Image: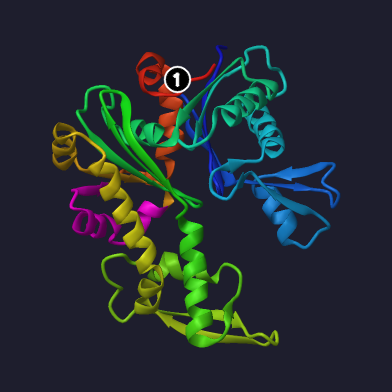
Amino acid sequence: MLSKKIGIDLGTSTVLVYVKGEGVVVNEPAVMATDEKGARVLAVGRAASEMVGRGRKARAVRLVRDGNGVDYNVAGAMLQHLIGRIVGRQRIFRPDVMLSVAAMVTGVERRAVLAATIQAGAKTAYLIDKPMAAAIGARVPVATTDGIAIVNLGAGSTELAVIGQGETLASESLPIGGDAFDRAIDATIVKTRGVRLMPGEAERLKIQLGSASGPLPDADLEVSAVDEGGARSTLRVSGNDVRAAIQDLLEAIATGLQRVVAQLPEARRAAVLRSGAVLTGGGAQLRGIAEFLALRAGVPTRVAPEPQSCVAIGTGMALDNLQVIRRGQHYIT
């Protein structure tokens, strides 16, 4: 039995793990349940969400703070759990692990993540920026392309980058993601209806009615809400309501894409206009978002196959392409 090669995407809402030869083997909430004092880990991932959801005396601790900032104590426990699950108790052959991180993460933070990975049982640990991993997972030929834009739409942030000849040529991170869309929908309902949506309802509206280029015809949804006095009620929300709530955030992403492309020399800009932009991450599943960004940013745009898994897949695939990845990454081992 040889050492496994593992790619891990530590996301704001979800952790995905890719194992070479097996594909994505873990797709769970990025949450850990501890006792009320935070001294003992009770569960990780889906089991932690279920434990907290059942109202047990457990405290939910999130892996990622504010979109990009990793809680390293949580990361260490999470990584130990994940690596242990995949490798098993008999760790004779310790795995090679590649983790994706936000492009704006500092050197100190990167070293802390690497140390946590080694302590969790990895033989070697490497880091790759999320946009580069997303591009590899989307099967973009990163080593040979003259220029292509990547828009990774995560839960806590949107990372935009232009990649060419194996290097990141320009990048930007926006504090806009799926969670921000949910908050915007909730805020719109408060403003227009005077009630607050129950937990999970804003996300349900986004998934079922959300659209960037036009609402579904005659689409609406009945959701649960609560007023200031705590009284429960139901109301119907239309696709137009949802689209109006998220419009400003979509415009901000389009403007961010324009800014990143504008940073490039003329030849690289021309290459991006030929190759276009590839959308990855869970937010890429929003209806019509590719058409919206193409129209607003002036860059041909397409959604990658399996957009939600691209970062995890690319992170694992990068272990077989270390020489290419090293050229363009702030690479630490």
Q: How many badges with numbers are in the image?
A: 1
Residue that appears at 64% across and 33% down:
82
Colour convention of the picture: rainbow
Q: Compare residues 309 and 259 and report the one nearer the observer.
A: 259
Which residue carries the number 1 mark?
319
Classed neighbour count for the residue bearing mark 1: other residues with Cα under 10 Å, few (<14), some (14–19), many (≥20): many
- Residue 290 lies in magenta, yes or no? yes
Q: Where's residue 126, x and y in %?
A: 52, 21
Q: Residue at x 72, y 36 (%)?
A: 73
Q: What range is drawn magenta here?
A: 283-302
Asked if residue 128 is among those painted magenta in the image, a careful observer would answer no
Q: Is residue 209 left or right of residue 183?
A: left
Amino acid type at circle 1 is Leu
Residue beneath the point at 54% across and 48% down: 67
Q: Quadrant of residue 171?
A: top left
Note whether 180 is above or below 305 in the view shown. below
- Camera-side residue: 302 or 131? 131
Can residue 233 be seen at all in this image of the molecule? yes
**Relative horizontal placement of residue 9, taking residue 285 as reference (left or right):** right
Q: In front here: 90 or 184?
A: 184
Residue 203 seen in the figure? no
Residue at image coords 44%, 81%:
237
Which corner quadrant of the image does residue 76 belong to?
A: top right
Q: Secondary structure at mark 1?
A: helix
Helix, strand or loop for the magenta stretch, by majority:
helix
Query: Image quadrant for the N terminus?
Result: top right
Above or below: residue 139 compared with residue 210: above
Percent x, y for residue 213? 26, 66
Specify the quadrant that holds the C terminus.
top right
Q: Position of residue 175 (x, y in %)?
A: 47, 52
Residue 217 horizontal/vertical position (percent):
28, 78
Q: Height in image: 228 above or below 290?
A: below
